[in-house]
Image (tube, coloured by chain):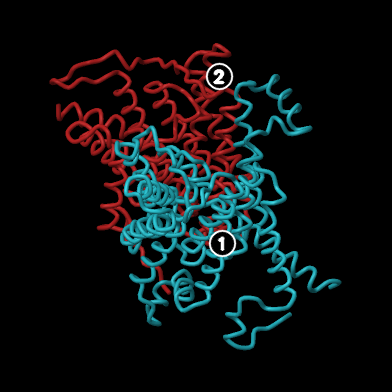
Chain colours: A red, B cyan
Amino acid sequence: MLGQLIVSGISIGATYALVALAMVIIYKTSEVLNFAQGDMAMLSAFVAYLMLEEQGYGFAVSFTTALAFAFALGAFIEFAFLRRAKEPTLLGLIIITLGLEMVLYGLASWRWGSDQKDFPFPVSDFATHQIGGVIFSELNLVTLAAALGLMLLLFLFFRYTKVGIAMKATQQNLTVARIMGIRVNRILMLTWGISSVVGATAALLIAPTDTLDPNLMWTPQLKGFSAAVLGGMTSLGGAVAGGFILGVIENLFGGYVSVEFKSVVAFAVIVLILCVKPSGLFARHYVRKV
Amino acid sequence: MDMKRDYYEDIRFLDSGFQVFWFIALLAALTVFPFLAGSYLTYTVNLMAINVIVALGLNLLVGYTGQISLGHAGFFAIGAYATLSLMSMAGLPFLLALPLGGLISAAFGFLLGLPALRLEGPYLAIATLGFGLTVTQILGRLHFLGGHMGLQAPPLNILGWEVTSDAGRYAVIMPICVLLTWALRNLTKTRVGRAFVALRDSDIAAECIGVNLTYYKTLAFAVSAFYTGLAGGLMVFVISFINPHTFNIMVSILFLAMVVVGGLGSILGSVMGAILITWLQIELSSITELPWIGPVLEQLSNQFFTVTGLPNVQFVVFGLIMVLIMIFEPLGLYGIWIRTKIYWKTWPF
């Protein structure tokens, strides 16, 4: 029982971790809380659906197209909206992303309606394996593997590639990065693109466990946001850890205490943890000078 | 340009004869409005007045005190449920239940203010967001409050006067709205209001000059929640039926949009923002029936989209308006107003 709950918690936590990663990548570079994250990912999942069901392409082509679309969408949003905001405030940027979220939601539900669709996926949620009394579905395993693989890729990318290091430089100090010859605008666009791809991966992994409709990413986005805050908003590792912690806590609470309040326990945990550590678990507390 | 020369000039409610004239004209217009307008228009204005109250309360918190809140639908719900259950279960009269509902909401505001003492930016956003979600989740589980089914509003009876029409409700809501607007305007000019602004600009500096951080931050949350709770209590009678879904996260987002689109830290801005967003919400919900745009959209839907999903166009338009206002005028509608005013004052230069 305990092992089973932890395992499914880790599996759901992996998707939270991906959404959290996507949020943190953007927040670190541009201090934007991207509330459109979830719906950018949702729209990408719908693109995959369009390719699979309506155009009849295979999984490989469809998923690649969806991820490419996600990249283009993220870069476009940065280019067309966020960059155009003059003298933006934190709240102004939040309102812009909330507005974009509405636009994307509206577009998706205009095109596909709000009825629920089955999202085809190469592995099934029902084919299961049993290891030491704990049941894994194949989808769980794929989710976990994809999430961990993507995280590893991201860590390598930020550590060893030139673009990744340029991103870290932009994150630390935009002006200095610009002086050192980094095209900051292009880096920001790339950041949004990459973040969008990470989010879209999460959506592609979440869609087969649920049905595909425009509300698909609403809850995962809130949970991912919570996970990112839990991990400290500026730390990639923290976001991942936050996602897993949140998934496991939520599942244990659902299993042992109350299923009814399973979905809100995440927020209660967040508020409690933030009371003790106001900047999350894994970020250094940052004190602003007067 | 007119300069303020002393403190009393600064806190004076109306500056010039010009302003006195327009203020009286506005009051007169608000008084005769229900006699001239139809029932539906009055209903719309009632909703606007309620949203103005919320926007004022939220602006006190976000614009004046610099605390972000994505959970005001929670206070809205608490005020609504508290007022309703005090009336239907405890049998209190409306005039007592409404302020009590507001105070209960204020008490929750105080409680939310406590963790907010240590949080800022995204951390505060997620904490308040969690609060808003938790309130509706818990309300949905409480069976004596109707659970997910919701509650029916009791008949509104004020000192023997049975209020049944939209105009009657207008007569209740609008004076409260005007009174609260006036009260908030005065609050921002007092010691307390100035302490809030000092907190917003730099809490450490504010503490150094003797502003009690704990007291004023929790006070800001409490006052803001009080306003929102009152608005919730009034909302019950306008829509006459509430359930937890009435107060979903979208409502919180719209409240925040009102304040930011209207203009942070400005009373006039909150009023304009609340009116604009409420109007858009009502107009856009029947977007297909608009002249010109409706048929074009329908044709577009047939070609590229689905006709069943057509009502969702309202989200696209709504979102775009929010985005464009924020991109081109970060100060919101109030910024546009200020620019127009300066343009005419200094014309032809």
Residue corresponding to mark 1:
B264
Where residue A82 sits in the image (x, y, percent)? 59, 49
* Residue type at tag 2: Leu
The one of A251 and B191 positioned closer to us in this rendering = B191
Q: Chain of mark 2?
A: A
B271 to the left or right of B71 = right
- Residue B127, can we see it? yes
Residue B242, picture quadrant? top left
Where residue A79 sits in the image (x, y, percent)? 62, 45
Q: Which residue: 64% across, 22% down?
A: B305
Where residue B325 sits in the image (x, y, percent)? 65, 51
Could you tell me how far apart the alpha carbons at marks 1 and 2 are, in whole angstroms? 42 Å
Q: In the current view of this chain or complex, which residue is farthest to the front?
A: B160
Which image quadrant: the N terminus of chain A?
top left
Residue at disc 1, secondary structure: loop
- Residue A235, can we see it? no
Can you say whether B280 is above or below A131 in the image? below
Q: Which residue: 37% across, 22% down?
A: A209
The one of A223 and B128 positioned closer to us in this rendering = B128
Q: How many marks?
A: 2
Q: Counting other residues with Cα less than 10 Å from the Cα at mark 1, is it few (<14), some (14-19), or many (20 or more)?
A: many
The one of B226 and A148 positioned closer to us in this rendering = B226
* Residue type at tag 1: Leu
Of circles 1 and 2, the one toward us is: 1
Q: Chain of mark 1?
A: B
Which image quadrant: the C terminus of chain A?
bottom left
Q: Counting other residues with Cα less than 10 Å from the Cα at mark 2, is it few (<14), some (14-19), or many (20 or more)?
A: some
Where residue B46 sits in the image (x, y, percent)? 59, 49
Residue corresponding to mark 2:
A50
Residue B247, disc: none
Are dots 1 and 2 on a single chain? no
Q: In the current view of this chain or complex, which residue is farthest to the right?
A: B348
